[in-house]
Image (cartoon, grey):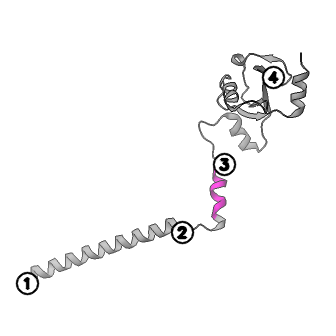
Amino acid sequence: MHDNLEQQAITEVALAMGMAFFALMVLALVGLNAPRPAGDAALPELAERHRVSRNQPTWQASEQASKKPPPLQLLIYYQGRYFDQQLKPINPKQVRITIDRRPLLAVAPTLSLNEAIDAKQALPMDELQLTVLDQRWLDRLEAMP
């Protein structure tokens, strides 16, 4: 008779543990699906703004630290040729960007996406951003000999 009481006690403890585990699982699932308060939405954005990755270029890390964007180093791709900011022809393989400048490649708005990507890949830079030339730049480029 005592064996039966011991088995019942162990069974009840196991059942209680199972119910507790199930209750915790339900609470966790409800907590994951609950909407977040509006005040918490700014926290991940703030944390992301101050995070610096090891793969992040130095100009981006300094930009986040000083809140002042670094100067741009403008490169222009127009009619199959590369130019610097002073509209002097340059060789894309010999372009060097200083560490304190942010590289920016400007292309004509009529350039196809494939041509723009090819122009970007011809330059030996990982963090190169693309932009479109405005009408003033296009007028200056068309007036060139």
At horizontal 63% and vertical 43% (from top left) the residue drawn is: 52
Q: Quadrant of the C terminus?
A: top right
Q: Nearer the viewer, residue 14 or 78?
A: 78
Disc 4 crowd rating (10 Å Cα; few below 14, some 14-19, many 20+) is: some
> Does 136 appear above or below 27?
above
Task: Kindly indicate whether the residue at mark 1 contacts the one at mark 3 (C-beta within 8 angstroms).
Answer: no
Residue that mark 2 sits on: 34
> Marks 2/4: CA distance?
53 Å
Which element type, helix, strand or loop, lies under badge 2? loop
- The type of residue carrying mark 3 is His
Left-right relation of 33 to 132:
left
Q: Position of residue 28 (x, y in %)?
A: 45, 67
Disc 1 crowd rating (10 Å Cα; few below 14, some 14-19, many 20+) is: few
- The type of residue carrying mark 2 is Ala
Residue that mark 1 sits on: 1
Q: Earlier in the sequence, mark 2 or mark 3?
A: 2
The nearer-to-camera label among 3 and 4 is 4
- The type of residue carrying mark 4 is Asp
> Marks 2/1: CA distance?
50 Å
- Residue 47: assigned label: none
> Marks 2/3: CA distance?
27 Å
Which image quadrant is residue 88 in? top right
Residue 45 lies within the magenta run: yes
- The type of residue carrying mark 1 is Met
- In the rendered image, the residue lying farthest to the left is 1
Q: Quadrant of the N terminus?
A: bottom left
> Does 1 appear above or below 142?
below
Q: Earlier in the sequence, mark 3 or mark 4?
A: 3
Left-right relation of 66 to 21:
right
Residue that mark 4 sits on: 84
Which element type, helix, strand or loop, lies under badge 3? loop
Please state the extent of the stretch shown in magenta in the rendering. 40-50
